[in-house]
Amino acid sequence: MPSTVLVGAQWGDEGKGKITDLIASEYDYVVRYQGGNNAGHTVIHGDKKLALHLMPSGVMYENAIPVIGNGVVVDPGVLVKEMAMLEAEGISCKNLKISCDAHVIMPYHKDLDGADEKSLGDHKIGTTKRGIGPCYQDKVARKGIRIQDLMDEKIFRLKVEAALIQKNAILEKIYGLHTYTVEEICEEYLPYARILKPYMAETSQMLNNAVREGKSILFEGAQGTLLDIDHGTYPYVTSSSCCAGGAATGSGVGPVNIDRVLGIQKAYITRVGGGPFPTELKYAEDGGEGLEAEEGETLCQVGHEYGVTTGRKRRCGWFDAVIARYAADVNGLTDVALTKLDVLSAFDTIKVCVAYECNGERYDYFPMQQSVLFHAKPVYEELPGWKGEDITSCRTFDELPENAKSYVEYLEKKVGVPISIVAVGPDRDQTIMRGW
Ligand code: GDP
Ligand code: IMO
Ligand code: MG
């Protein structure tokens, strides 16, 4: 059975939750391999929209074992709440496995995330303030606290004590914030440890045994390619390896065991937080005007582009084929799921950015220097739309209006990767399978 990495191919929020939920039943395991509760993945359950932050979206199926891999950073309080929310919805979490090597987000990580951002002023990253960056900083500095430490009270106390010497000094002396005692942290965290202990596992060994038995794995990426710590628009990125390569290190499964890399792309593009965004259609409140502001607002309102984690209004823009080609390369995409095609039914004509221009030079590939990206002017090609035609009930490619079909085929040609899934609405069945 083939194993697949499902990866965000833009700046996150591409619809990874919906597509994971759609295909998860074909896999034996669904594994989160990076990020933490900065992610917000939406799945539709009956007539309800559920937002998942830590739990792999495959949790909706009893036969797919949900795994939180070693590359994830876990806020145990958030996980316990999410499990309770799912159980209340009648969705069992009994099969969950949490890697003993995943790192734990501590209370001071959240304080430091907020304080770091404040100190950056206008240059702030616009993080989700969930403590993600500071937790990964401790991991790389070899000072982190892991799930296996949390499960052993004696070790946990010692590690917290050691961490607080430095953290309290930073909180108090640099940021003028409150400090922590070992006791108050243990009081909050040890009850979580008792709840989560039965789920802790050696997940790398478990997944490798599964591979040997011919079982299949779906790796569910969080965030997206342009938010990747190495390949994204640094420093306006998250602190983990969101790209397909991260699936191997973040799970302990070798790359040769991955057969397919499915990139998720919206039929347009969005981003939350700061950083360059060449095709951004600026909102009036951000200084945009005229048609640009109007088109951006239409994408936002028709596409309901508000963050699942923070509620922030997402910045919106036309599809960027330069970014799509770059994402195809750095992830090794084998195919693409194109989401939210229905949102484009609101437009007479649709623009696609095929290259950038900066200082009189044309860039067909992702520019080497970020300063170019900041000043890049998109070179657009315009395609006729299918305004007013409701495509949300189309279930085969042939049912789509001619111009919608042409748009999908045009993107395939511009990006060079086949589009095997087209989503035309948020529900699981609002999907067109094209050779998946
Ligand atoms: P993720 O972080 O990549 O999982 O994406 P989010 O859940 O943050 O954002 C995607 C949003 O688009 C969610 O509200 C989904 O329910 C919704 N969505 C997904 N696919 C489609 C689609 O094809 N059409 C429409 N209209 N909405 C969609
Ligand atoms: P999903 O999985 C969109 C963005 C934040 C910020 C930057 C760093 O739902 O696609 P962080 O808190 O990670 O240190 O913030 O990354 N960001 C996301 N944007 N979707 C996400 O997740 C995101 N997770 C983080 O807005 O710009
Ligand atoms: Mg999201």
Image (cartoon, rainbow, N blue to C red):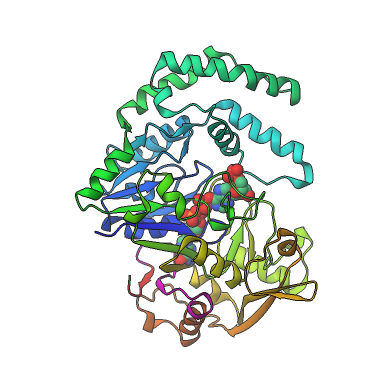
Q: Is residue 120 above or below residue 30?
A: above
Q: Is residue 287 left or right of residue 323?
A: right
Residue 241 within the magenta-colored segment of the rendering: no
Q: Position of residue 148 (x, y in %)?
A: 39, 26
Could you tell me residue 3's position as x and y percent? 31, 57
Return the residue nearer the eye: 357 or 425: 357
- Read off the magenta span: 412-429
Residue at the extreme left of the image, as rendered: 213
* Residue drawn at (50%, 18%) of the image: 159
Judge whether residue 428 is colored magenta: yes
Q: Residue at x 38, y 52 (%)?
A: 219
**Which image quarter is the C terminus in?**
bottom left
Nearer the observer, 215 or 303: 215
Left-right relation of 79 to 95: right
- Residue 258 visible? The answer is yes
Which corner quadrant of the image does residue 197 belong to?
top left
| 422, above or below 74, in the image | below
Image: 285 above or below 293: above
Q: Is residue 311 visible?
A: no
**Quadrant that contains the N terminus:** bottom left
Q: Nearer the viewer, residue 393 or 213?
A: 213
Residue 342 pos. (x, y %): 49, 72
Count all numbered tags in the image, as a single digit.
0
